[in-house]
């Protein structure tokens, strides 16, 4: 009870300081924030100085203490003879406090210049943000493609304890060429996730997405794919390459391939055709009735299973249903680990249907396809976009035989899922529809905070005024 009272009192003081005191004083108050791990070490240092002084005095027979006390008494007597004690006392005390604040301010300023040479952010703000993020919930996100990287871009503002489990079934484009020529696992989706989780996201995204337009053998390849391929050759496998790249890029969280096996997707269509290869499934233009992979039952990456077992929150999607989300669940150990975990689990449904994969699909059809692919129910809620796209976007997508995913409430309820409705869409000037990373992450964190298990976690990590506000 006392801790809660102190926290509340501190919040009131901090709010008052924002209104009545200059910005610099408000920055000083931040150093008293709970969980910063500064106050305890400052007090420990002061105690060390006192103990060291006492130890020296005892060692020398207490003589220094006697003469110091005599000197202090003489100085104080002289001061009080000239200036009354009720004036000199407060003046000396204020002078000491000002010297202390000045010294501490200059010390922090010197450290800030080294750690943040651009000077656009206070050191205490950096420390507070770091402590908050690394106390955040352990979130596991499963998927692939641009949908996963979009979600990660938003979630990294709420927690640094993020694990992205990414499919390695891609066999088209630059990833497919590198897979054939070097025998490495496709790096494309992992590249996007690493860039999304990096602190310098904009610069890293531009660099990793840069595609060579000339050069013998380089045309069409992205720099990020070549970088991860080179790291795979140096470190020995994709797992070590991603781990090393994560350190180089200083990302928040970690990115893990679902498996290190050379997985190849196949799909059976309603017209009887059997399509081999992830890139060919969408091109085939049929209705998928069954999805699988070769080899059957590939082993999961042990680190991915550990991340799921330690997770506080599990999110699937958004992304291409049959070529980004479900391929991760074709690794039996991953599906089993998710099913066994009793934490909040949610599926983020796509906004639009995808030609060649989910034409005419409703929200319930997406859910049923995931359940069928892994043979069990993995999540207990589904996030569905609430607002319809503009007429311009609808016309654009209709030309590609793509339409908004219809929410069939009764069927979703029969599937045993709760529905989370929210506006999480962004639309550019050309009518291209995507999930908005900030809105999507905010809604997902808010929903997690509203669950019985998530409520306690967010209070523990962020306090009463959590990051969902």
Image (spheres, rainbow, N blue to C red):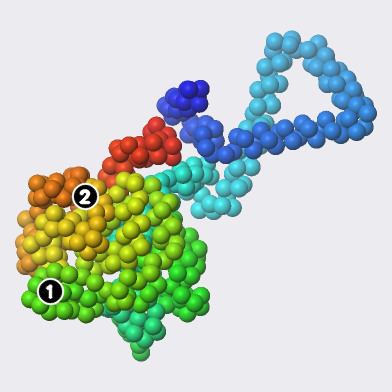
Sequence-wise, the earlier of marks 2 and 1 is 1
Q: Is residue 279 visible?
A: no
Image quadrant where one finds the C terminus: top left
The residue drawn where x is 51% and y is 49% is 119
Provide residue 359's location: percent of width, then percent of height: 10, 65
Task: Give the residue pinned by disc 1.
Answer: 269
Up-down relation of residue 82 to residue 200 (above or below): above
Q: Assign a secondary structure to mark 1.
A: strand
Whether residue 178 appears in this view of the structure is yes
On the image, the x and y values in percent for residue 231 come to 47, 75
Q: Is residue 134 shown left or right of residue 220?
A: right
Question: Quadrant of residue 168 in the image?
Answer: bottom left
Instruction: Tell me where residue 23 appears, x and y as whole percent.
Output: 48, 34
According to the picture, the residue beneath numbered tag 2 turns out to be: 382
- The image quadrant that residue 355 belongs to is bottom left
Compared with 325, 408 (above or below) is above
Instruction: Please name whichever residue, 208 or 455, is drawn nearer the observer in this view of the structure.
Output: 455
Is residue 320 shown left or right of residue 362? right
* Residue 136, numbered label: none
- 326 and 179: which one is in front? 326
Element marked by disc 2: strand
> Who is closer to the viewer here, 328 or 450?
328
Between disc 2 and disc 1, the foreground one is 1
Q: Position of residue 401 (x, y in %)?
A: 7, 67
Q: Are marks 2 and 1 in contact (CB under 8 Å)?
A: no
- Between the residue at mark 2 and the residue at mark 1, the CA separation in whole angstroms equals 26 Å
Within-10-Å neighbours for mark 1: few <14, some 14–19, many 20+: some
Residue at 6% across, 55% down: 391
Query: At x 86% / y 18%, what residue is drawn?
Result: 74
């Amino acid at each position: 009870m006392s801790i809660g009272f102190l926290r509340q009192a501190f919040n009131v003081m901090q709010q008052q300081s924002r209104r009545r005191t200059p910005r610099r004083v408000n920055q000083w108050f931040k150093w008293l924030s709970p969980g910063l791990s500064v106050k305890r070490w400052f007090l420990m240092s002061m105690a060390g100085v006192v103990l060291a002084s006492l130890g020296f005095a005892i060692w020398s027979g207490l003589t220094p203490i006697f003469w110091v006390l005599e000197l202090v008494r003489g100085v104080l007597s002289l001061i009080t003879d000239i200036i009354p004690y009720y004036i000199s006392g407060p003046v000396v005390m204020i002078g000491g406090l000002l010297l202390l604040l000045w010294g501490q301010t200059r010390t922090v300023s010197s450290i800030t210049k080294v750690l943040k040479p651009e000077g656009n952010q206070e050191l205490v703000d950096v420390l507070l943000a770091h402590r908050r993020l690394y106390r955040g919930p352990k979130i596991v996100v499963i998927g692939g493609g641009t949908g996963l990287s979009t979600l990660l871009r938003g979630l990294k503002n709420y927690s640094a304890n993020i694990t992205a489990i990414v499919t390695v079934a891609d066999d088209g484009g630059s990833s497919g060429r590198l897979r054939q020529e070097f025998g490495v696992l496709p790096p494309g989706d992992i590249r996007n996730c690493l860039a999304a989780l990096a602190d310098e996201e904009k610069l890293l995204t531009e660099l990793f997405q840069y595609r060579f337009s000339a050069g013998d053998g380089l045309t069409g390849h992205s720099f990020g794919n070549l970088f991860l391929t080179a790291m795979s050759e140096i470190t020995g496998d994709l797992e070590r390459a991603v781990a090393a790249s994560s350190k180089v890029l200083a990302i928040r969280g970690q990115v893990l391939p679902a498996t290190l096996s050379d997985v190849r997707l196949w799909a059976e269509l309603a017209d009887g055709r059997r399509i081999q290869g992830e890139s060919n499934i969408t091109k085939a233009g049929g209705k998928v009735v069954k999805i699988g992979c070769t080899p059957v039952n590939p082993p999961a990456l042990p680190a991915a299973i550990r991340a799921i077992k330690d997770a506080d929150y599990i999110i699937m999607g958004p992304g291409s249903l049959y070529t980004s989300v479900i391929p991760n669940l074709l690794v039996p150990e991953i599906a089993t680990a998710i099913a066994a975990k009793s934490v909040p689990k949610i599926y983020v449904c796509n906004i639009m249907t995808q030609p060649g994969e989910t034409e005419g699909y409703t929200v319930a059809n997406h859910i049923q396809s995931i359940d069928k692919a892994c043979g069990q129910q993995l999540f207990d809620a589904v996030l569905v976009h609430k607002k319809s796209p503009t007429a311009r976007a609808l016309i654009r997508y209709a030309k590609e035989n793509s339409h908004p995913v219809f929410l069939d409430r009764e069927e979703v309820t029969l599937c045993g899922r709760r529905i989370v409705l929210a506006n999480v869409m962004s639309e550019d000037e050309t009518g291209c529809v995507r999930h908005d990373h900030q809105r999507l992450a905010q809604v997902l964190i808010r929903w997690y905070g509203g669950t019985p298990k998530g409520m306690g976690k967010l209070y523990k990590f962020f306090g009463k005024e959590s990051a969902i506000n």
